[in-house]
Image (spheres, helix red, strand yellow):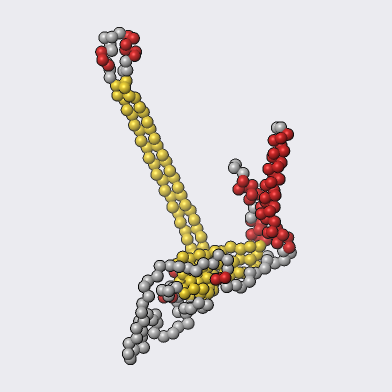
Amino acid sequence: MSKSVQINRLVLLAALLATAGLAGGCSSIDRLSAIGEKPALAAIENPTTQPGYKPVQMPMPKPETASYNANSLWRNGSRAFFKDQRAARVGDILTVTVNITDKANIANETQRSRTNKEDSGITDFAGSKLMGTQAAKVLPGRLLTADSSSSSDGKGSVQRQEALQTNVAAVVTQLLPNGNLVVEGKQEIRVNFEIRELIVAGIVRPEDIQSDNTIDSSKIAQARIAYGGRGQITDIQQPRYGQQVMDVLLPF
């Protein structure tokens, strides 16, 4: 190996290490300052003021004009005769029952096979046998000879099993024109040096909220459910920054 090649490899390695250092510099400093300390809980903040928050826009039906009838306690557009305590306005709280139990076992196989053969010719082209040996060699005896075969075998399988059962309180962050509620809830639990967090967001129909102000996660439209954590255990389970950089840059 030449000296110039060795120098180029050293320069490339130094560049990779510098990139890894820049990528994880701030995070590393934060982690070094938190050695021996418990991970801090996130502050309680307004979800609508977070970076990247966008109000939900969905197709809405034509608004219905409220009409009042004389000597009647009921008006068009009302959802209930008596007032209840279920979440209905921005800032109200309801409980989301996260109950996810998914199990899938799918297997597919497709096979295909085809064989073709084409063979055509003329045994005596323009009287080649009468014209002598040399003429028989020049004139074609077989016009077309072709053989082809193809086959394919595709297999696929999916095996998945997930289970998550818990409750989380969510806040109504937006009231859509048709009466549906946009909700978002976040829960953090710290056990020793590990924080477990659960995030739930989506669109809720008021009619699906139970009388005890709870709703099942299966009835949340556009549901976004995230369950994870951060801390010492999560940090150990993650590859080092240098390894992640090498996995991205190396072609093999």
Please say if 185 is above or below 212: above
For the point 55% across and 65% down, the residue is: 52
Outermost residue toward the bottom?
Answer: 71
Would residue 121 be found to the left or right of residue 37 on screen? left
* Place of residue 59 in the rendered image (x, y in percent of width and height, measured from the top left): 40, 67
Outermost residue toward the top?
Answer: 132
Please say if 171 is above or below 143: below
Task: Please tell me in which quadrant of the rendered image residue 147 appears.
Answer: top left
For the point 42% across and 41% down, the residue is: 153
For the point 68% across and 59% down, the residue is: 27
- Number of marks: 0
Q: Nearer the viewer, residue 98 or 117?
A: 117
Q: Is residue 16 visible?
A: yes
Quadrant occupied by the N terminus: top right
Q: Nearer the viewer, residue 32 or 193?
A: 32
* Place of residue 202 in the rendered image (x, y in percent of width and height, measured from the top left): 48, 68
* Place of residue 160 in the rendered image (x, y in percent of width and height, measured from the top left): 49, 56
Would residue 194 be found to the left or right of residue 131 on screen? right
Please say if 52 is above or below 130: below
For the point 36% across and 84% down, the residue is: 75
Quadrant occupied by the C terminus: top right
Q: Is residue 208 visible?
A: no
